[in-house]
Image (cartoon, rainbow, N blue to C red):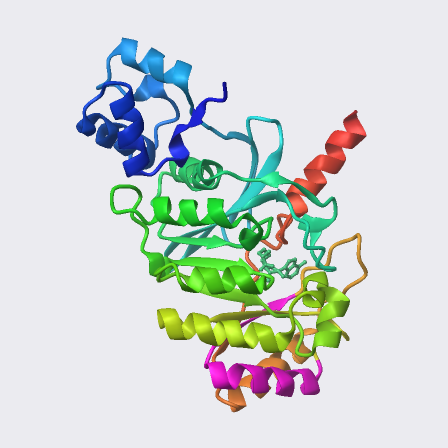
Amino acid sequence: MQKIDIKSLDLKELTEVMSNMGQKAFRAKQMYDWMHVKLVPGFEDMTNLSKEFREKCNENFEYTTLETVRVQESKLDGTKKFLFALRDGNVVESVWMRYKHGNSVCISSQVGCRMGCKFCASTLDGLERNLTPAEMLDQIYSITRSTGERVSNVVVMGTGEPMDNYDNLLKFLRLLTDENGLNISQRNVTVSTCGIVPRMRQLADEHLQITLALSLHATTDEKRRNIMPIANSYSIDELMDVCRYYFDRTGRRITFEYSLVGGVNDTDEDAEELIALAKPLCCHINLIPVNPIKERDYVQSNADRIQRFKNILEKNKINCTIRREMGRDIDGACGQLRRSYKLEEKGRA
Ligand code: SAH
């Protein structure tokens, strides 16, 4: 029989499970606190539970933990990149960044990815499996324990397409922002998607106050299809409609992510087309100088081009930032650390 993944249960579900074991409601609250506030790595650390009960828990439940395989720290800005091993031996990566306004963690939502974006390293070997809510939380919990500092912002922008793992993502978001748990403000959580329209619509209806970021990267369907296979399923018109719907339902301003790729999507004309899309939505634009991966020959736009692109947007009163390249010296781009580790492993085998 498969054991219950206890850290993926919300307090209501945990209370029910405890009650089935003949435990009172306060026991669930106690355990929830150990798992999601005190962030202990196992039942044995739950010192106010009897030894007998802890043993019973070990028999009945799976308590996920991550093993830290590698930590790389940037000498440039202190950014730390963690490579974690899951129970089944798969590895995922997460990034810790220190900003003026607090500490931010970027987590992975899947092992690998099946979206196939041409410039992205996470998708080169396809999708291995979805992460559970507990495994998404564990990345934040492990990093909090390791740095000894509170995490205030979470971005789901690591490996994987969060909307392709929708139910687990939603459970994770509810646990992460639960007042009985880490209680991270929903406004400090961002979920980034390549644009799976029906799931974006569903998310708009969940009564959450999180920020939705759309990886747009191109301004026409034709150009987008060249770099993002998902564009064959959903048009830019459909994307703009669902972004409007998200804003109307939640009042939260959308972010467009736009990775600037030299000679692909960085002309003045691209900037003008981007303005036409962004203006009616009054969204924020995050320009990302593409981080070249060696398996593809995409190059970064040069610094002048990036600045000019930004100036054109700003002249037209579009709110935009160039993403600071954190951890450039430590396999910064999505999926690169995991990939270089996997290639090394293969080399050793
Ligand atoms: N699947 C989600 C989230 C993961 S990627 C999504 O597509 O949004 C997070 C962001 O980084 C996305 O905007 C993605 O397109 C971008 N990205 C991926 N690889 C990149 C690279 N090599 N250089 C710049 N941006 C990249």
How many circles with numbers are drawn on the protein? 0
Q: Which residues are magenta?
A: 267-289
Quarter containing ligand 1? Answer: bottom right
Q: Is residue 34 visible?
A: no
Does 53 lie within the magenta span?
Answer: no
Compared to residue 218, the image places residue 183 above or below, namely above
Does 286 lie within the magenta span?
Answer: yes
Compared to residue 110, the image places residue 262 above or below, namely below
Q: Residue 27: where, in percent of width, then height?
A: 22, 25
Q: Residue 275: where, in percent of width, then height?
A: 57, 85
Q: Residue at x 47, y 55 (%)?
A: 155
Q: Residue at x 70, y 73 (%)?
A: 302
Q: Residue at x 68, y 62 (%)?
A: 230
Q: In terms of depth relative to the viewer, which is nearer, 131 or 347?
A: 131
| 155 left or right of 49 in image | right
Compared to residue 63, the image places residue 213 above or below, namely below
Q: Residue 128: where, in percent of width, then height?
A: 66, 39
Q: In terms of depth relative to the viewer, which is nearer, 92 or 83?
A: 92
**Image quarter of residue 324:** bottom right
Q: Residue 123: where, in percent of width, then height?
A: 70, 50
Which residue lies most toward the front here? 20
| 68 left or right of 24 in image | right
Compared to residue 146, the image places residue 255 above or below, namely below
Q: Is residue 294 visible?
A: yes
Which residue lies most toward the bottom here? 315
Magenta stretch prevailing secondary structure: helix
